[in-house]
Image (cartoon, helix red, strand yellow):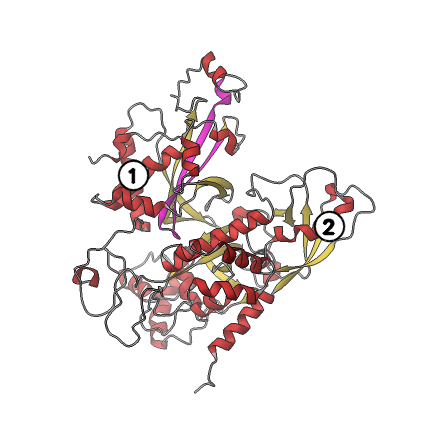
Amino acid sequence: MAAPYDEAAWSEEAARRVWGGAVPLQVHLHDADVTALPPPPPFPTLGPRIGYLPLLIPVIKAHFSNTLPPGVDTVWFEYKGLPLKWYVPIGVLFDLLCADPERPWNLIVHFRGYPSEILSPCEGEDSVKWTYMNSLKEATFIITGNSKSVMNMSQADQIALWESVMKVNLDGYKNVSTRLKLGPFEEDGLVQTPSVERQQSSDEPESPGSGKPCRVPVRLYVRSVQEDLEDIEDAIPLSDWESVSYINRPFEIRKVEGRSYITLEHALQTLLPEFFSSKPAIRADDSQHVEALDSPPDDSDITNSSRSSQEVEQASVSLREADIAKKAKVKLVRVQGIELDMDIPFLWVANNLKNPEYYLHISVYVGKRKQ
Amino acid sequence: MCDVCRWTYQGRSAVCPCSAMGVSPVWDGTLSPDGFNASAAALIKRWKEIEVDDSLPDWTWKPCCKLGVPSEEEGYLALEGVYHSCEGSQVEESNDFDGADVVADDTWVQSSSDAAHVYDFHVVYSYSYKVPVLYFQAHLAGGQLLTLDEIKQDLPSNSFKVLSDSKWTFITREEHPHLSRPWFTLHPCATSDWMKLLLEQTKEQSLQYLPAWLSVVGQAVGLKIPPELHCNS
């Protein structure tokens, strides 16, 4: 029997690492915005993983203030020609755009020429705060079925919550966020609403309405890379956002037959069926095998040890045929800068690696076959 | 899962406790993904049936594409190329502008069809709120995008102010979920509340959902929805 697993202690440790995580940045002023020679040196700074780029603008601006052109600033950031979406947390941008983590991460800051066809407008901290609160409301709606716990927050609490995120203050955050009573996510997937008491050992189902299946807020960022890519560092940098599929879709917690916990793999299959299911263009009994199995055919790093060998044997032959029809293969899954194994318990990931707005952001690299 | 209350019930009973307990389930005003697809198909069909004067284009279904892989199940509705005159009413494509149009609005520079405002409307399903969401943008015939202020001037004078002040609807600029560009959108968070009121007494809530919803949100953005759309046929 394994040593006692102190879940609470592990969760606390995970939270400290997530909140403490930061991306070392090197911010270069865009050539055209330089008005004084010699051009100013790049500005080294830390971007909190759970933070947002516009929140760094004051300190960046201060650094470059002597060399900026006069007039109104419209600040935006760019990485290798790609304008960065300011409403995506810094850690997610880094995980998604830097296949091979570049440290420090070299970004270019612009003070003019805001690409408004590509980026929605940003009015500094207010816009980021609105985005954060809006995402929190959405996540709350997803988890509980309504946005009440956020809408009912006092002004003081709302301010305190936002300040704690802005200043990366985990203790301040926990003070307020626990009162929202959101989660933790459990394998039996029942929503904990304050008005309903949990019936621990009863066989009676909870009254309907309060027992709605719990959903986990997830934001997936799917990027395609060359199918035959061996080393992730050889991935071609992204040149436009059309090459990324953004999927804002909750995962509904349901007990899976024969499994004691929901794996990351299962969650991704559910959310990205196009990238996991094979289209069996074959005989009926083969397609039955395909449907009966949860897992995709396996010639990647996914371990098969948890499945019965009999199952695998039966299915592998027909699945290999179906494999040919498969369009894409998951190469890498990153959350909070960590590469995750496919059989990790998904709910543990959701509970411990989510962002302060209660969303779990997952970067997925898929190898696309050229068609 | 129970179709009625959408609760995953366990146990051997073939009947969900919601009906067993004699509690009549209360519809919460939301729409399932399948319901959205079905309602969309019904809308497209009905729109073509009632469209008499050809002043509005047809709704089309656009499948969602993930990295070039078109989805067989997921998609959104699009109504594109809706022309607006400066008086806020939709014009026929025969475009009979006259001098009066120029005088009515000082944002017009010339009374030619080049200065016409062209609207695109998309109806996208939100998995988070389980309701449809309206995304829209407007541009000049030449392609240049209009600002929110310019769009406001297209609307019947009071409607924009009333609806944006109301707690039911407000317009924001956000990234289109499928097109990676900023569009204008009507925030969906209150949709299920008012849809619940609107369709409480209706049968076939799923199929009627989009026509009913559209007749309300259309008003917020100056899109005139023919009343025949959501009449029971």
**Residue A326, can we see it?**
no
- Chain ID, mark 2: A
Q: Residue B81 carries which label?
A: none
Amino acid at the residue labelled 1: Ala
**Residue B80, can we see it?**
yes
Q: Which of A11 and B62 is in front in this view?
A: A11
Residue A74 lies, with reference to residue B144, above or below; the image says below
A330 left or right, relative to B39: right
Q: Which of B27 and B116 is in front in this view?
A: B27
Q: Residues within 10 Å of mark 1 (few under 14, many from 20)?
A: some
Residue A40, horizontal then vertical, whole percent = 78, 49
The magenta region covers: B112-138
Q: Residues within 10 Å of mark 2 (few under 14, many from 20)?
A: few
Q: Which residue corresponds to the image point at 48% horizontal and 20% vertical from the top-left?
A: B113
Which quadrant holds residue B144?
A: top right
B69 left or right, relative to A255: right
Q: What element carries label 1?
A: helix
Residue picked out by circle 2: A62
Q: Taken as a whole, is the magenta stretch helix, strand or loop? A: strand
Kindly report which numbered mark, 2 or 1, lies closer to the viewer in this rendering. Answer: 2
A244 left or right, relative to A149: right
Residue picked out by circle 1: B212
**Residue most extreme to the top:** B99
Quadrant placement of the N terminus of chain A: bottom left
Mark 2 vs mark 1, CA separation in Å: 53 Å
Q: Nearer the viewer, residue A251 or A18?
A: A18
In this rendering, do the residues under marks 2 and 1 share a single chain?
no
Q: Which residue corresponds to the image point at 28% horizontal and 44% vertical from the top-left?
A: B197
Q: Is mark 2 on a helix, strand or loop?
A: helix
